[in-house]
Amino acid sequence: MRTYSLDDVFETRKRRDSWWTVYFVDPVACRVALPIANHTQLTPNALTVLSLVLGAVSATCFALNHHVAGAVVFYLSFMIDCVDGKIARLKGTGTPFGLWLDYVGDRVRVVLCAGGLAYGQYALTSDVRYVVLGAAVAVLDLFRYVNAPQMKRVREAVREERGEREPEPESEEDIDSLERVALVPRARRPRSFPRRFNRFLARHRVRSHLISGIEFHAAVFVVAPLAGAWALIPLAGVAGVLLLVNEVFLVYRMWRFTRRHGVPSSQESREHVLV
């Protein structure tokens, strides 16, 4: 049986990830993944189930207004959710079912925790704003994770129509990179601040869109509960607005990309008819 090193685990990290994961989760997750890989037979699916169970415990803590405990357990749940992917990549034991389980488990955890927060605070204060908060958190999260695969389908359709063979972009931010590369020759591309900033983030494995679903979850289920009940509505509200702005911006960049490189209108019409 192979013995893995910490460097082996580091190699399983994503090339670019959310800043919350890079700075606050990966340093712990990698060190947790190492003994799991070397001394246990835990599978990625078992770790995903453990993450979901911890998510339910976190939701229960929130419902009982034990916010600090709920925040800590939510962090542990997300950290274990990162560990399962590292084990899958390290040992090559990932499965299509595991991808589905991980995806659905994330959504269930968010809905449970949003419901737990809303119930606990509403039961304590009878303030209907907390009910609205819980519903808004769940809807925003579901919108993001419904929107992302649909944008991916659009990108794939455009690339297929253009006959491109290069690897598919890893994220929506790469769409903009492809568009700018196509428009501006390499020798004349200016070294603008956004480009330098993006390169700086890339060197640190951080994605250029700094407000994603992960930061949204961290703000609502970790930072705000640790700060106190007073912070739930303002912090969740700000995080929600930033997430929505980010999603709208990504959709706008995708629209620009499809306008410039999209399929002919006749092809689009045929696809709409098929749908």
Image (cartoon, rainbow, N blue to C red):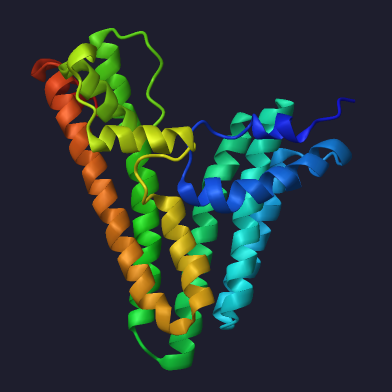
Q: Is residue 190 above or below residue 24?
A: above
- Location of the N terminus by quadrant is top right
Q: Is residue 131 left or right of residue 253?
A: right
Q: Is residue 236 above or below residue 29?
A: below
Residue 137 visible from this viewpoint = yes
Residue 139 placement: quadrant:
bottom left
- Seen at 33% across and 28% down, the residue is 174
* Image location of residue 222, percent across then percent down: 52, 67
Residue 94 visible from this viewpoint = no
* Image location of residue 28, percent across then percent down: 67, 50
Q: Is residue 210 above or below residue 6?
A: below
- Seen at 58% across and 44% down, the residue is 102
Along the line of sight, which residue is nearer the eye, 80 or 44? 80
- Location of the C terminus by quadrant is top left
Q: Is residue 230 left or right of residue 183?
A: right
* Image location of residue 29, percent across then percent down: 67, 47
Q: Can you name the residue that lies furthest to the left here?
A: 265
